[in-house]
């Protein structure tokens, strides 16, 4: 028979274990949240040492696959809870739902993203038991790279807060034209998890054994930062300038609650036209995403006279506009961009925002959302392989809003583009960190592609980004204004545009081979 003293001892032990578990989960949440400081507008990139160092430390304390998932999921809740909290703004202010539903929807969104961190922790723990002589940080880096890639592709993906973006203000940013954001993301995982991994291994088996086991990682990280330093003082010119355009970007600053009111459609259009007529000396004038709230089929005849004016002054007008196509008795709606005047062409958005512009698994999920009264649009995705717009004799490839977050999409259109354009309406996210993260992502696309990138937005941040990923000019947020400047046109391809993810895949293979050799040496 168990004595009361033994029962009390067991209860105290269980309470202590539960208390320790709660503390570890709190630390996981905290480490993840701190990592959000590495991205724009904060740019405190060393904060990720705490995030991924904390991940290594937590994995040392995992005893099961279930526990691995819980720790990873909790760390992911911190990352995305702090990093994409701006989603709440659009749901609460413009979703026509109450605060409670907005909070629940935001938490659900964050939780879905956090699942991928949980899977990465599970994969790391599983691999560690099969490759005991491999560094925990290396296994974590491989696992995170895989799950982050999945997060960026499933249901069109949500490739936001990839860790490579935190390297924007480091020497490693110079490697973007070589291997793109996926190379930088993998290097971020290696860099930020390495110190904690070396230290924990050192405590167990000594410094010499720790350095030997981590030799492959140390070599790759040292070489990467060294090459980045070299390129920062001796930049390479992968592309060649051949011409210049004078461009005007119009920032209408229309609040989201006023933008789609029928009575405001004509006054808004007249304001955009008036601002544009003051800059007919520009080769290109750009209005932001859905600046025209009339359907293209309705407004095109009305635009005939204006298009002639733009054509006579050798000016191309490019604007965001909703567009319909009628096929087999069905009307499909598209988020589109239209060029008129001296230019021509249309572009239909290919990558739609999940739960914003379309509903994944609509037959199932749509019914659930209807119960909560969440109104969602249903757009169609445009076809692949759309030709660039024409601006006089030059080619301009367009990305609509969130599409700029897809490096593969930009890589695909760059070879036939002289300049890139992204139009957006970040009014959805108010005065949050979302638009700043969006701008930082656009800077990476410019750096990777070796092209000027024009960013035309409704409420900001409207900007011109050069081929080095540097903002040359910009407009303040929440201000009605125009930005007129010269934008250089480039031809040629950076290594990333030419070879894609070949460099990062090669690096993964070489690092695996190197680690196999080191693991055998360590085992002997």
Image (spheres, rainbow, N blue to C red):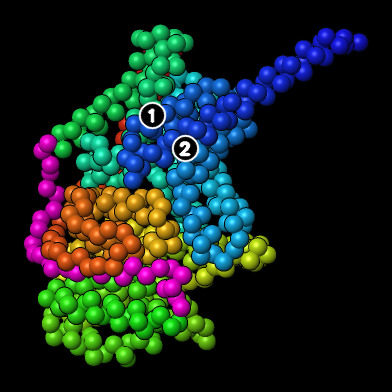
- What stretch of residues is rendered in magenta? 233-261
Q: Which mark, residue 1? A: none
Q: Decide which of 464, 96 is in the foreground and name it.
A: 96
Residue 139 in which image quadrant: top left
* Residue 465 horizontal side relative to residue 98, left or right: left
> Residue at 24% of width from left, 54% of height from top?
446
Is mark 1 in CB contact (under 8 Å) with mark 2? no
In the rendered image, the vertical position of residue 83 relative to residue 421, given as above or below: above
- Left or right: residue 505 compared with residue 82: left
For label 2, the residue is 33
Numbered label tally = 2
Whether residue 507 is visible, yes or no, is yes
Tell me which numbered mark, 1 or 2, is placed earlier along the sequence: 2
Give the distance between the C-alpha atoms of the residues marked 1 and 2, in whole angstroms.
Answer: 12 Å
Q: Secondary structure at mark 2?
A: helix
Dot 1 corresponds to which residue?
49
List x then y, in percent, for residue 310: 18, 83
Residue 251 lies, in percent from the top left, at: 28, 67
């Amino acid at each position: 028979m168990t004595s009361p003293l033994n029962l009390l001892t067991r209860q105290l032990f269980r309470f202590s274990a539960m208390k320790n578990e709660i503390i570890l989960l709190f630390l996981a949440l905290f480490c993840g949240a701190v990592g959000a400081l590495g991205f724009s507008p904060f740019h405190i990139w060393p904060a990720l040492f705490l995030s991924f160092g904390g991940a290594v430390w937590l994995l040392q304390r995992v005893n099961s696959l279930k526990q691995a998932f819980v720790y990873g999921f909790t760390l992911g809740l911190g990352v995305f809870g702090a990093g994409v909290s701006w989603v709440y703004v659009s749901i609460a202010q413009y979703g026509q739902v109450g605060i409670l539903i907005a909070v629940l929807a935001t938490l659900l969104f964050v939780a879905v993203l956090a699942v991928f961190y949980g899977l990465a922790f599970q994969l790391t723990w599983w691999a560690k038991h099969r490759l005991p002589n491999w560094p925990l940080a290396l296994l974590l880096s491989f696992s995170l790279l895989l799950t982050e890639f999945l997060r960026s592709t499933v249901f069109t993906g949500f490739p936001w807060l990839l860790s490579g973006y935190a390297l924007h203000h480091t020497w490693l940013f110079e490697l973007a034209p070589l291997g793109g954001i996926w190379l930088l993301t993998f290097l971020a995982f290696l860099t930020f998890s390495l110190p904690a991994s070396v230290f924990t291994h050192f405590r167990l088996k000594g410094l010499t054994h720790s350095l030997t086991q981590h030799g492959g990682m140390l070599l790759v990280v040292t070489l990467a930062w060294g090459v980045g330093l070299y390129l920062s003082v001796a930049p390479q010119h992968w592309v060649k300038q051949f011409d210049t355009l004078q461009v005007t970007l119009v920032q209408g600053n229309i609040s989201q609650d006023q933008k789609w009111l029928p009575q405001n459609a004509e006054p808004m259009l007249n304001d955009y036209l008036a601002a544009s007529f003051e800059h007919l000396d520009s080769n290109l004038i750009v209005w932001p995403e859905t600046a025209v709230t009339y359907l293209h089929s309705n407004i095109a005849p009305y635009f005939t006279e204006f298009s002639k004016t733009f054509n006579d002054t050798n000016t191309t007008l490019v604007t965001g506009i909703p567009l319909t196509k009628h096929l087999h008795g069905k009307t499909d709606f598209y988020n589109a961009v239209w060029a008129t005047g001296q230019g021509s062409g249309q572009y239909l958005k290919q990558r739609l925002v999940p739960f914003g512009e379309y509903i994944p698994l609509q037959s199932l999920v749509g019914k659930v959302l209807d119960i909560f009264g969440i109104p969602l649009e249903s757009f169609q995705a445009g076809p692949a392989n759309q030709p660039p717009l024409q601006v006089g004799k030059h080619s301009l490839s367009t990305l609509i809003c969130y599409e700029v977050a897809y490096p593969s999409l930009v890589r695909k259109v760059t070879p036939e583009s002289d300049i890139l354009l992204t139009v957006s309406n970040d009014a959805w996210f108010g005065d949050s960190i979302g638009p700043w993260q969006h701008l930082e992502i656009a800077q990476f696309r410019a750096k990777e592609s070796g092209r000027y990138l024009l960013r035309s937005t409704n409420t900001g941040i409207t900007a011109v980004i050069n081929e080095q990923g540097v903002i040359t000019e910009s407009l303040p947020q929440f201000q009605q204004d125009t930005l007129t400047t010269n934008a250089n046109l480039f031809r040629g391809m950076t290594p990333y545009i030419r070879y894609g993810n070949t460099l990062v895949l090669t690096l993964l293979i070489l690092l695996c081979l190197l680690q196999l050799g080191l693991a055998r040496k360590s085992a002997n």
